[in-house]
Structure formats: structure tokens, C-alpha cells
Amino acid sequence: MLQFTTTNKYLAPLFLFNMLFFTSVFTLAAYPPINSEERNCDGLAQLPIGSIQGTCLGLLADNVQYKQMGLNFKKPRKALELPQSHQILVTDMGGWTAGKGILWLLEFQSNRYRHLISVTKVAEKLVLPHDIKLGKDGSIYLGEAHQITRFRIKGRRMIDREVVITGLPYPDGQYLHPLTSFVFLNNNDLLINVGSQTDDCGLLKKVSAPNDASTDKSECSEVKEVGLRRYGFIAKTNQWASDFDQYATGLRNSVALLVHSSGTILQGENSADLKDANEPYEEINLIEQGGFYGWPYCLNRDFSLLKKTIGVNENSCNQKNYKTPYSLMPPHVAPLDMMYYTGRKLPTLTGQLLMSWHGYRVVGNRLVSYKVNAKGLPILTASEKVSFKRDPIAPEVEFSKHFFSPKGGSKLDAQHQEVISHWNSVKGLRPEGAPVGLLQLADGSILIVDDKNKALLRLSNGISFEENQQKNSFLPHEASKVIGFNFSGPRKSLMIDQCSACHNELKSDPGALLNPHSGWLKTLEGKTLLQTKLTREAGFMPPTGKLLPEQVKLILQGVE
């Protein structure tokens, strides 16, 4: 266990001031705060990110602010506030390689979270830790790729650690969605996500080459296992059964999972990563035992990728146990967490469903809310009236409005509200947001974990940032210079074909990605981020499937 502490009540504020001052003068933080002493967000440095009226986003902690205290997030995911304390636990995957995960304990001077007084690694060498929750028994439950453990925190140490669920599928080799998310049902049964190993089980290849003899024509071998497992609770021993029942199938990636007090179970589906920026739509699913929710054969409500000539599950959208989505969401938003907000600090959000949209495409990087009924279900309206906004792609600066028009059609869907909306990358102003975990803090503010920018943010009440007042300072747009990479010829064509659906910058501003300072050419542990993305076994890119060795070689030969 490593611990870094600032205990003196006078030194802590001075330490914080020095860190903020010297950071702002000599370095550019991942999240540079608004350059004004008069602007703060409920006691924290306010960030230049747009949010709904009466709210603001403050920087709670990041590696720049607290580097000297030993904070070194790699890929933080979710957080848990310990009851009757000023401590927050943060899961950190450490990357997509097993055995590099960390559980951090951050202790603050008060629940205002202005002054961090200690940083502790309470566990290391974890296997892709993601979810963390407080159980009914007061224990803390931690989800790794292969297991769920529980423990308690005494002082700043982990005690009474034991494995409660083991044998979760995390095979060697390629695995696109290995992370463990879980919820406690009202009877304390555990419902656990089992994500897909592939993007679409090779379905697109079958569709694009139906007459290719080398194409596997058999039914998807994953389909009966991908979805949600239920482990029954044994009250007498305060344990869970070692066996499980397959509660629901056809769910590609259920990291966004939530249970309402009424018993309603909601899942936010990360649908297949088609190259089409307009398809497929993401889904909000109402989970019922025994339901099949479509993956990989049926997308949206009634959009099948299959052709009858393929001979694979031809009636995939018409199976008797097929459950259509409760509501669609805009395409490629990548929902990663959900919560019902019960606080009073942000009254415009009280009683609503909040959801983090992590997607790298132009509809992602948002926090949204839905009004719900007594059962926690989002209110539905006519689909043709449901709209969403897309981020501008440089040199454009205006957000554009679009209406639902999914393949296969839709009649009723839920309209979201953008809680944090202007979170796109603006040079000299802010990086693109990447929200993962959501947590309602004891004071009613909302903690947001941003894994890409390695930061903890807090949404609270205050004066909202108005980007229109700043816009002229950041125009006209100038494309970044590509540094240290030969982005031309077949290599350029390959990368645009395989990567630009998620990373539009390759078309409009490739230097924003292809540079050794903050982009894909940055070196970590002896490898460029580009090499890591293309070759790692889990969470690889592109998500539609690993490139051929010769394609990877061609791209990496461009590094100068």
C-alpha cells in the first residue's frame, strides 16, 4: 500500500493554491480552468464546459493538480463515496492489460471536496477493475474482469477481502468487452454483465461476402452467453450461489445497468460499431427474465443485417422471445453508466434518470437526463419528434440538430435533455470529454469520472459557462500539424477507412491525433498509444475487429 499525505490544515490550502497557480502558469492541464479568480464552481476551479442553466462543472482531482501527492490515474472508471467520511474510492483499469489495475482512495478535508489531504493505493495488480458498489451489508463490492470481491476500509487500508463471485468469462486472446458491471436486485440477487468478445460475431463479414467459402455460416457461438447472469443470494450465509441462470441474452455490452426501487431493470446497450455514422442507434432496454434483446442479429427495433442467402437465423427480429428496445438513443453515443438522481442540490434534475454518453463520435461526450414515470421508465413520445445534436466538425463551430430516423422504423422513444452539452474538443479551451462513472455525492452534487482525461469532475450549482461569449477567441480554426508520422498514400487511405468513423479528426484535423505530445504517438511503457490500440488483446481498435498483421505493419511503419 502506497500513501501520500498532506495533513497540516494550514499547508493543505497552501499546497492546493501552489499546485493550481504553477500548473496554470507553466503547464497546460488536461482540463485548464476558466482563467478568472472570480469564477469557481461551488468551491472548485470551474471548467469551460457547457451545462444546463444554474449548474457548473468543477475540477475535483486530476494528475496535474495532485501530481506531487502521488495521484497518477491511468484509466479511471467509477467511484464510490464512503458513508460518513470524506473518502472516495476510484477504480482504475490501468489500461487494457490484466494485472495493472489500481484501487485509489482519496481523502478530503471535508465533504466540500476542496482540499485533498491524502492519496492511497489500497489495491494494485487488479484485473481490469471497473464497477464498485456499496452492498446492503455495508461491504464494498469490486468488479474485476474475472471476479467480484468484497471488503471493508479501515482507516486507509483494505480489510476482510474475500471473493464472492468467481469464474466470470475472461478468456485469453481477443476480448472486446471484458469489463464487469453488476447490480443488486431488490432481493439481493446479483445481476452481472457478460460482454461480447466480438463486435458483431463476424456478422458483417457474412453479409458482405455471403458466397465466400471461408466465411463461417454457423450460428454465433456467443449468443447464448452474452448478456446478463443472475446469481441467487443465500441469506443464511450472506453469500451467492456458485451457479447462475442466464437471465437475459442478446445484449452486446451492459456496463450501463440500473435497478429502480420499483424493481424495474434498465440496460443501456452499446450497439455494434458500424462505420455508418447514422446507424445503428443505441438502446434503452427494459430487462425481463428470459428475454433475447437482438445482438448480433437484430439492431434498433427491427433492423436485421442478415440476408436470407446466408442461412443464419433468418427471422432474427421475429423470435418469440425477442424484446424490442424500450427506447432508442442516438447512434454511437456509448452509454456507460446510469443513475437516478434523488438529491435536492440540483432541483432541475431531481427524480430524473441520468446517463453518461462516452462515445467518441459527434453525438457522444455528454451527460444527459430523462424524465421518468413512477416505475423509473423514461417518458415516451412520438419518435419523429425526438431530436439530438451533433458536435461541429472543424472548421464548423455550430452544433446541428437532427431528428430520429432509425432503420427499421420506430414509433415511440424518449427525449433526453443535455445536462452537459458543450464538451467537444476546442483548441485552446478544453479537451473532448469522456464521461464514464456517475455518482451522487452526499451533498447532492454529482461526481463524474472522465477516463480519457484522467480526471474527477463535479457537477454542482453555480453560474453556467456560456461558450458563445468565448467563441471569437478561438476562431478561425487552424488544423494541427502532423508530427512524427507519414500520413500519406495507402497508409492514409487505410486509416481513414478503418478509423475515421469514430475519429473524424483524421479527415479534418489529423494532427490533433497524430502527434507525440497529446495524441496517438505519445509513448507509454515503450510503445506508442497507436501501437497499443492496434495490438492489445482487449478493448482493441478498431472495435469492428483487429486489422490484419500486414495492415498493422503498414500503419506502424508511418511512425518516424
Image (cartoon, rainbow, N blue to C red):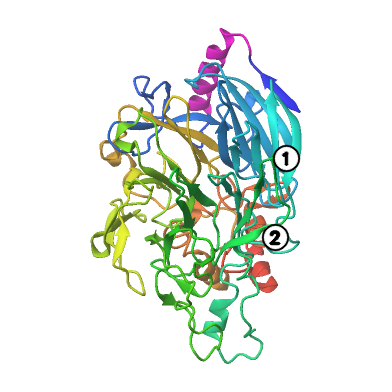
Secondary structure under the numbered disc 1 in the rendered image: loop
Q: Position of residue 76 (x, y in %)?
A: 59, 41
Q: Nearer the viewer, residue 54 or 163?
A: 163
| In the image, residue 79 above or below residue 333 | above
Label at residue 237? 1
**Residue 156 showing in the rendered view:** yes
| In the image, residue 557 above or below residue 465 | below
Q: Mark 2: which amino acid?
A: Glu
Q: Position of residue 245 (x, y in %)?
A: 64, 60
In terms of sequence position, does the residue under pointer 2 or pointer 1 come before the other? 1
Label at residue 385? none
Q: Give yes or no for residue 177 being in the magenta stretch.
A: no
Horizontally, residue 310 falls left or right of residue 215, namely left
Give the residues drawn in magenta, as a range.
Answer: 7-26
Where's the C terminus, which quadrant? Answer: bottom right
Q: Which residue is drawn at 60% across and 60% down?
A: 195
